[in-house]
């Protein structure tokens, strides 16, 4: 604050971020006093206090209607969503994490395919025996699919608890307000299942060579 003494009169919960560990809301006069290079004619952002019981979304829509296209108004949830989109889709750190998810998906699918393909190759006689006993191709394929889903569950459970630990460290050490949401857990599990199934569809092609006639 450039050696200015400021008295904090109240607090609000917002959490830290990648740019700053905390934020302050001041009056216009205090802001101009602290930041001498700022201009009173150039306003970047303002805080609107609404009456108790009023709809924040309705007030924001009314402000947007009156001030468009000079300015716009966002509710707190809209502001948080815009901030998330900015960091995920514009800044390099978000693009890096998104690319990391795609690379992890491809790498996991390749590794799982190698495991399943090796397992199928080693058990080819057993699969051929099942066909010789009268089991149809769908049943034999289903064994590999269930095995892949089992791998997905066994990999997801420890990864989930490890993610909880990392989230806790980010909240306590980096002061980043992240929480493990149910929708994120379901989304990651579905993505993991898709990865396993995609590897399964490649691995079961080897089962076409399980010919019962080769057993004799």
Image (cartoon, rainbow, N blue to C red):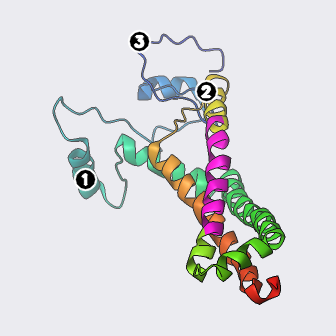
> Where is residue 98 shown, x and y percent of the image?
66, 58
Disc nearest the viewer among 1 and 2: 2
The residue where tag 1 is placed is 61
Mark 2 and mark 3 lie on one chain; the one further toward the N terminus is: 3
- Residue 122 vs residue 162, the one in the foreground: 122
Q: Secondary structure at mark 2?
A: loop
Mark 1 or mark 2: which comes first in sequence? 1
Question: What residue is disc 3 on?
Answer: 9
Residue 175: which numbered mark, if any?
A: 2
Horizontal and vertical percent for residue 189? 55, 53
Region rendered in magenta: 143-161
Relative to residue 167, is residue 149 depicted above or below? Answer: below
Q: Measure the C-alpha gap from mark 2 to mark 3.
A: 22 Å
Identified at 66% across, 27% down, the residue is: 169
Instruction: Tell me which numbered mark, 1 or 3, is placed earlier along the sequence.
Output: 3
Residue visible at 21% across and 51% down in the picture: 62
**Measured from the top left, where is residue 131 in percent x and y?**
66, 81
């Amino acid at each position: 604050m450039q050696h200015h003494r400021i008295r904090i009169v109240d607090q609000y919960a917002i959490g830290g971020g990648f740019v700053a560990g905390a934020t302050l809301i001041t009056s216009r006069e205090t802001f101009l006093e602290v930041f001498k290079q700022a201009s009173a004619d150039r306003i970047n952002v303002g805080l609107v206090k609404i009456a108790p019981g009023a709809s924040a979304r309705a007030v924001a829509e009314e402000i947007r209607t009156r001030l468009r296209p000079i300015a716009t108004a966002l509710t707190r949830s809209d502001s948080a969503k815009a901030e998330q989109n900015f960091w995920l889709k514009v800044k390099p750190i978000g693009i890096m994490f998104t690319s990391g998810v795609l690379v992890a998906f491809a790498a996991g699918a390749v590794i799982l395919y190698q495991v399943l393909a090796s397992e199928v190759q080693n058990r080819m006689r057993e699969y051929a025996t099942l066909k010789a006993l009268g089991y149809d191709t769908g049943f034999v394929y289903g064994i590999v699919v269930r095995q892949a889903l089992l791998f997905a569950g066994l990999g997801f459970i420890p990864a989930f608890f490890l993610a909880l630990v990392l989230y806790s460290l980010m909240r306590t050490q980096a002061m980043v307000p992240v929480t493990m949401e149910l929708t994120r857990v379901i989304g990651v599990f579905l993505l993991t299942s898709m990865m396993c199934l995609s590897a399964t569809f490649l691995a079961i092609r080897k089962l076409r060579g399980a010919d019962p006639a080769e057993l004799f």
